Image (spheres, rainbow, N blue to C red):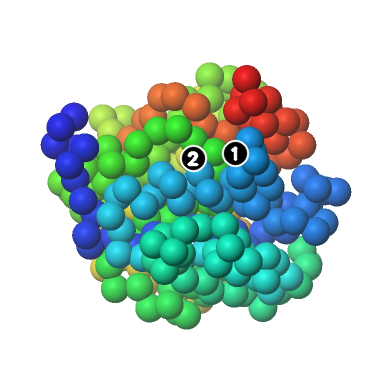
């Protein structure tokens, strides 16, 4: 653990995905983007950044849409301390409503083309709340330099239907099911990934060939045909704040 604790990710950038419109959380998200909804008086995004900064990443990029761009700019300049906000950049997708949304994978590709990342890339979904340390994920990635997913055992096949389901063997992803009707596992993707920089052009290749632009699970299933993908399973607390019930559960958990 000492080796992991001292690990610095000097050749790592981070992209936090905040481009969705969170229609399942309406009316809360009609005027406030999901990553800026408060938990214990602070936006969800604060907790994500708080877990990312200690990694020592070169920079953090927030990917959002045109409708909510001003709110993220306000958050960046008025909520964060000077030392942190100078490490954060933004890229804005030209979409104003849900019908124009890019989808997660197309949004990642848009950010890659707009920002020109030159380092390995940590990608985090902006609706995540978790309390585990990502340095273990980076430690394994550093050993093998293969795409890697942070996974969590949700403990329920019924609950697993709402997520990307991972079938794992010896630390490797053998199969990925995107929101399956009949999950083969209770192990789900947290929406946290690391990709080596040399593999980032794969996003452009995927999108350019008219593949499903939305859920990252479809991209992972496509990528698995040519690339081995690894997985680290985390314990602790993890929530995908995707609907009112989950948001209430996280809110109540933090208030206790």
Q: Disc 1 versus disc 2: distance between alpha carbons? A: 7 Å
Asked which secondary structure carries label 1, the reply is strand
In front of the other: 33 or 77: 77
Q: Is residue 245 above or below residue 210?
A: above
Q: What residue appears at the point 30 percent right and 58 percent down from the top-left corner? A: 57
Taking 7 as reference, is 194 left or right?
Answer: right
Q: Which of the two discs, 1 and 2, labels the residue nearer the N terminus?
A: 2
Q: What residue appears at the point 72 percent right and 31 percent down from the top-left corner? A: 248
In front of the other: 183 or 40: 40
Q: What residue appears at the point 61 percent right and 44 percent down from the top-left corner? A: 42
Q: Which residue is mark 1?
A: 240
Residue 101: give x, y in percent of width and height: 69, 67
Q: Is residue 70 visible?
A: yes
For residue 104, what is the image quadrant?
bottom right
Q: Which residue is mark 2?
A: 190
Q: Is residue 178 visible?
A: no
Residue 26: give x, y in percent of width and height: 83, 48
Taking 160 as reference, is 28 left or right?
Answer: right
Q: Are marks 1 and 2 in contact (CB under 8 Å)?
A: yes
For residue 166, what is the image quadrant?
top left
């Amino acid at each position: 653990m000492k080796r992991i604790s001292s690990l610095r990710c000097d050749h790592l950038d981070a992209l936090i995905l905040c481009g969705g419109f969170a229609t399942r959380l309406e009316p809360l998200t009609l005027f406030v983007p999901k990553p800026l909804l408060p938990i214990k008086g602070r936006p969800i995004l604060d907790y994500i950044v708080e877990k990312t900064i200690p990694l020592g990443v070169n920079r953090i990029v927030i990917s959002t849409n045109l409708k909510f761009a001003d709110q993220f700019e306000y958050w960046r300049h008025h909520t964060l301390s000077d030392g942190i906000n100078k490490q954060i950049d933004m890229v804005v997708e030209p979409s104003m409503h849900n019908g124009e949304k890019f989808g997660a994978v197309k949004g990642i590709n848009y950010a890659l083309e707009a920002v020109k990342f030159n380092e390995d890339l940590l990608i985090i979904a902006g609706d995540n709340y978790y309390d585990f340390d990502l340095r273990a994920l980076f430690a394994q990635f550093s050993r093998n330099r293969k795409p890697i997913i942070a996974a969590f055992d949700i403990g329920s096949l019924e609950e697993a239907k709402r997520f990307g389901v991972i079938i794992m063997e010896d630390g490797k992803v053998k199969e990925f099911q995107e929101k399956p009707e009949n999950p083969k596992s209770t192990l789900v993707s947290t929406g946290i990934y690391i990709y080596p920089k040399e593999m980032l052009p794969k996003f452009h290749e995927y999108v350019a060939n008219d593949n499903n632009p939305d859920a990252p699970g479809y991209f992972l299933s496509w990528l698995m045909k040519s690339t081995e993908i690894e997985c680290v399973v985390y314990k602790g607390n993890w929530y995908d704040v995707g609907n009112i019930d989950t948001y209430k559960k996280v809110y109540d958990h933090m208030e206790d």
